[in-house]
Amino acid sequence: MKFDDVLLKLGEFGPYQKRLYFLLCIPAISVGCYMLNLVIILETPNHRCKIPGYDNDTYAIQSPYHEALVNQTIPLNPKDRRQPYEKCHYYRESNQTGTMEWIKCTQWVYDRSIVRETFTTKEDLVCDDASWTSHIKLIFYIGVLVGDIGFGLIADFIGRRKTLMAAVLLWNVSGFALSWAPDTISFIILEFIVAAAQHGAFMVCNVMSLELVGPNKRVLCGTLIHGFFTLGLLYQSGAAYVLKHWQWIDLAIAVPLVFYIAYYWCIQEKQTRKLVRDDFRLIPESPRWLMSKGRYDEAEKIIQKAGKVNKVQLPEKMINPSLVEREQTQMKLWHLFSTKEMFIRTTILLFNWIAVALMYFGVTMHAGNIGGNFYFNFFLNGIVEFPAILFVILTMDRIGRKRLQCIVMVFGGIATLLTIFSILFGGDDFTWLTTTLSLFGKVGSTAAFSVIYVMTLELYPTVLRNAALGGGSCIGRVGSMLAPYVAASGAMIDGDFSTALPLVIFGFVSTTAGLLVLLVPESQHRKLPESVQDGIKFYEAEEVESKPLDCNGEDKSFLMMSKLE
């Protein structure tokens, strides 16, 4: 007996699972806010050196006298249409020679027409310190990786529910503290903790939601949760547009975190017209995890309650410990490279994980450099994820995994490569076209995230599937770590090509990864491999003509998939 056998009798996605799934999806909204929050609060607006001795200097021109003083003191920057002034130097007349000296400034004034204050403007992370914005983003995504690994190990040891609550509490404390970070060092430390806590919670919510549903519903549920992530991006863009100050924006996304603490407490149920206190938790422990730890009585209690909610008649004793099958020994990450066929497949898929993350995060980070309204560009980068997710749901079983991954990666890659023409030859008049093409890149990467997840699950044997998915997710963080540096790479050169360079890099990597994926086997309508030898011979795997159905006519082709613990 496996837990999937229990789910067949309980219902793969009944009212009980739907309620819990919805509750576990809600934190993804906050995760969406934090995963790209640094794009907003580390935005670098137009700026120039502060005129020495002019205490009330502002970036906006105040008067004809102020305009003349700016023109006399601040060099122009003719190579950049969006940044009219030299950012890091000013002119000062030499007392000895009477000539104008080129002086590096230590104080700046910022264009506050779009944002009142970002952490970048607060700490003057510009000119020689401009790279700090990329370093902070790098440290944040390292925190995400640490959270995935650390909370993943803790969840396997003490349980999903306790780990989720520990992550939520840490997330609350660090999230609120972040709004009052007094300096750059404390800000970096708190961002690292927030990153680990929020993505650790997201990882546990993902695992718990997938452990609750039947194999046939895992792909759907694993995809839909990212729609809640997208809702977070939209909420954040609205909050940023209204508040325009990094501290208030941080508070606006931290306040909802308090709600998740309520997941710990009991709820009350109506029973025979009377309220009675029950030990039915708002978020109970995963019964699949309890079974894996031999805690059958606790798992039985949750399953029986789930049966009542689903209105399913279950046997008095659903779990028979003597019939519970032992899990197959899981092989380690290095076994993914154990043969030539597995080496090629793994290398291509890992490169796709990196390319998808690089494009997804990089295009959003670069949105403010393209032109147009910064907040509207950020909003558009969020809203386009909905059609991308819907497209994957509707086409994955029709087109096939490999072809769909190739199509969306190449589509997004070519779109961003084409921005070189709209930027270099179109100028400001074609900013709308550059924005549209970059959004196509975001659509492609969002769709590819869902497809690469399923491909990784299906192309590896049962004993390697967990290692493959965990390894792919971790290696994908390399792409998110590189994204801020690629997005800022345009600062190394002058002229219009500085705007196009990051998009060209994103497009080249995405297109290359999409074409390489054609070298891996197709997994659609094929039996999932159970052994390493099955995985090696996947090209010869038997094709399933028709998917097996249960008595209710539901597809059971994913029953061969191992649990996602």
Image (cartoon, grey):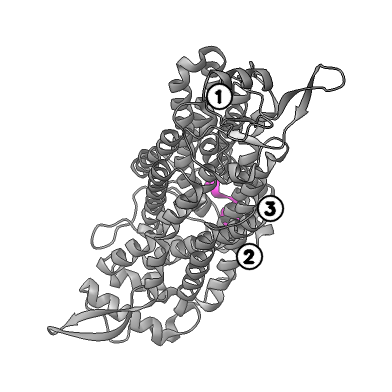
Nearest to the observer: residue 38 or residue 83:
83
Residue receiving disc 2? 331
Residue receiving disc 1? 417
Specify the amino acid type for callout 2: Met
Disc 3: CA contacts within 10 A as few (<14), some (14-19) or many (>=20): some
x, y percent for residue 449: 49, 45
x, y percent for residue 170: 53, 68
Specify the amino acid type for callout 3: Phe
Q: Earlier in the sequence, mark 1 or mark 3?
A: 3
Disc number for residue 337: 3
Give the label, 1 or 2, closer to the camera. Answer: 1
Q: Earlier in the sequence, mark 1 or mark 2?
A: 2
Provide the residue span drawn in magenta.
533-541
> Answer yes or no: do the residues labelled 2 and 3 have beta carbons within 8 Å?
no
Specify the amino acid type for callout 1: Leu
Q: In the current view of this chain or complex, which residue is farthest to the right?
A: 96
- Above or below: residue 154 compared with residue 334: below
Nearest to the observer: residue 128 or residue 317:
128
- Residue 534 magenta-highlighted: yes
Q: In the current view of this chain or complex, which residue is farthest to the left?
A: 273
Nearest to the observer: residue 26 or residue 511:
26
Q: Hey, which quadrant is residue 390 in on the image?
A: top left
- How would you classify the magenta stretch by its main secondary structure? helix
x, y percent for residue 89: 72, 27
**Which secondary structure lies at badge 3?**
helix
